Image (spheres, grey):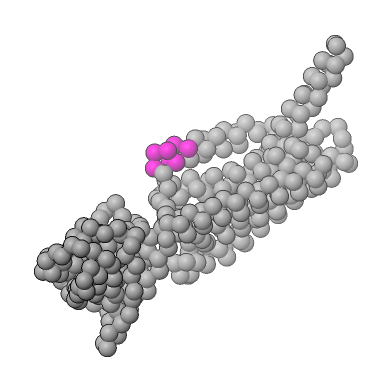
Amino acid sequence: MKNYNFLSNKKFAFIIAAVIIVAGIISFIALGFNMGVDFTGGSKITLQLEDRADNAAVDEIEQIVKDEVGEANFVSTIRSTAKNKTVIVTIKSVKSFDNKVRDIVSELYKVDTNDLEKVTTADSTGKEYAYFTFDSAEKPDEKTLSDRLNALGYGEEVFRSVSTNKDTVTLNFYSTSVEEQLVSKINEKYPVHNEDISTISRNRAAAQTKTALIAAAVAIVLMFVYIAFRFKQFASGFSSVICLFFNLFVMFTFYAIFRWELTLDIIPACLTILGYSINATIVIFDRIRENYKADKTSFDTAADSGVHSTMLRSINTTITTLITITLVYILGVESIKAFALPLIIGIIAGLFSSVFLSAPLWSVLRSKKKDAEVTGKAVKQAD
């Protein structure tokens, strides 16, 4: 590409970028994002099975999950790796077991669910149980209450006892969770050696989403200020920010098209992409500034020369980084892969934007600013 003029042929780079942007917008509207429980709230259940889980087992476990929590609340069921016994089940936030009990008690005893505060303890076997104590004049049939509660337990006894002292009712029942019940159901078909359940509430998920957006916005604004201050031009700062947005846009386009799950790991990945991309852009802008200082005849000539002189460095840096990140993705565990995958996409997008877009964008914005200044001076002279 020694004879390729990046500035004269900038329309080709802009067309490619425009096609990617249109494809991304269409995918965002038509497909949306596969938001993980980190952002929507829900539970991730990691099951260590006694036997190796083949494709048929994973499919059957997925169907069990859908039957129990509903297809709308199902997110994914995957194997951790191809050769082990670990299956990861992810579901959205569903009504908790205790809230289901509250609904039954509220219906039968005519009490407000907000008045039912659960107290949890354990029996001699270590099995957890709980009780509600509340005031009610209603005296429903004990068998009806027992049947309704036991129906929540997938064949296990949930109801323990109920007693009445004047108008005070004490209901005792075995406490569990939807996630634990789901594990129990899967265990009937595929014995579970060990399980790990992590749950994120909707409020916490919303807070994490807000934090992610604020972190990305602050990073971009600070980078814009730094670039504009360093190169003493608004055009340079704005063009670099456009490139940063483009890199993140490409990454999210891939996530939308391929329905990859967005997890909390996307936040540090985005910030890493921003930092890596801006570094490549600064190197190119610095060389352009040096070339233009040496020869002020043509900014486009200085810019094209600057891109050519730094292109080999950009390619070599990208390749060496990609080798490392790709190996991390291939050999890493699921949490590491969730961080490495967006980095791979963002780094490749960063190479394209820094080499093909950054300098042409700077040139276009710079020329538009000059045209505006000339127009302003002409208007003043006419006045």
In the rendered image, residue 209 lying in the magenta stretch gets the answer: no
- Horizontally, is 285 left or right of 162 in the view? right
Query: What main secondary structure does the magenta stretch of the protein show?
Result: helix
Give coordinates of residue 24: x percent, y percent: 48, 40
Using the image, determine if residue 163 lies above or below residue 112. Answer: below
- The residue drawn where x is 46% and y is 57% is 203
Q: Which residue occupies the foreground of this view, 212 or 365?
A: 212
Q: Which residues are magenta?
A: 25-31
Q: Is any part of residue 175 visible from this angle?
A: no
Residue 42 visible in image = yes
Q: How many marks?
A: 0
Outermost residue on the front side: it is 166
Residue at image point 25% right, 70% down: 168
Q: In the picture provided, is 306 more to the left or to the right than 257?
A: right
View extreme (bottom): residue: 124
Vertical side of 127 occupied by 240: above or below: above
On screen, residue 255 above or below 172? above
Residue at 66%, 58% (x, y): give it: 317
**312 relative position to 330: left or right:** right
Percent coordinates x, y for residue 308 in the rendering: 73, 45
Task: Answer left or right for 13 relative to 175.
Answer: right
